[in-house]
Image (cartoon, rainbow, N blue to C red):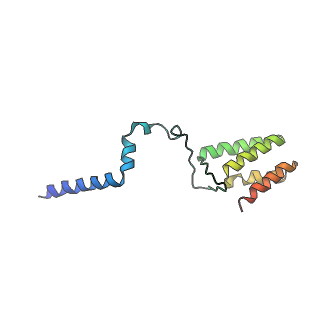
């Protein structure tokens, strides 16, 4: 009699899991989901750490992508005005608090366009 109730309880638990975790079970069975997440629909993910978006569209970057974009911005910011403006466009897309040092450096630049753009982007963080 005890075995019957144990089997009945296990069936009930499996049934509840199938109801509430249906999507996860489908994903586990589906072979297409074995590929990496970046290949599927070219989605980008963001971590909650230092995440701040002031734009209507939410472009999400992983920590690795954020670091690569910051390094690109620092390299671009060490050259001419056009490269500095490209770096500021990247900063606008990234919209993360980690770009504030680059924006502060832009406020001290000799080109007025770079100063204006940096000031505009810093204002978005207030």
Does 55 sit left or right of 120 as displayed? left
Does 37 sit left or right of 29 as displayed? right
Pinpoint residue 38: horizontal percent, then vertical percent. Answer: 53, 40
Pinpoint residue 70: horizontal percent, then vertical percent. Answer: 69, 46
Q: Against 17, is 41 above or below?
A: above
Pinpoint residue 22: horizontal percent, then vertical percent. Answer: 36, 50
Q: Can you name the residue that lies furthest to the left here?
A: 1
The answer to whether any part of residue 77 appears in the image is no
Q: Can you name the residue that lies furthest to the bottom here?
A: 126
Q: Nearer the viewer, residue 49 or 117?
A: 117
Q: Residue drawn at (75%, 50%), measured in percent from left and top?
A: 102
Q: Can you name the residue that lies furthest to the front here?
A: 56
Figure quadrant of the C terminus:
bottom right
Q: How many marks?
A: 0
Rendered image quadrant of residue 42: top right
Rendered image quadrant of residue 33: top left
Q: Residue drawn at (50%, 41%), measured in percent from left and top?
A: 37
Pinpoint residue 93: horizontal percent, then vertical percent. Answer: 68, 48
Q: Residue drawn at (55%, 43%), measured in percent from left and top?
A: 43
Q: Nearer the viewer, residue 93 or 65?
A: 93
Figure quadrant of the N terminus:
bottom left
The answer to whether any part of residue 54 appears in the image is yes
Rendered image quadrant of residue 56: bottom right
Does 66 sit left or right of 4 as displayed? right
Does 126 sit left or right of 17 as displayed? right
């Amino acid at each position: 009699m005890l075995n019957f109730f144990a089997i009945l309880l296990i069936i009930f638990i499996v049934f509840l899991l199938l109801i509430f975790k249906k999507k996860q079970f489908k994903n586990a069975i589906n072979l297409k989901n074995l590929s990496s997440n970046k290949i599927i629909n070219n989605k980008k993910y963001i971590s909650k750490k230092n995440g701040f978006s002031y734009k209507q569209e939410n472009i999400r970057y992983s920590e690795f992508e954020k670091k690569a974009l910051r390094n690109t911005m620092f390299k671009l910011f060490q050259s001419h005005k056009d490269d500095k403006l490209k770096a500021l466009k990247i900063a606008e897309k990234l919209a993360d608090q980690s770009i504030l040092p680059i924006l502060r450096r832009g406020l001290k630049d000799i080109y007025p366009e770079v100063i204006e753009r940096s000031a505009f982007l810093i204002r978005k963080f207030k």
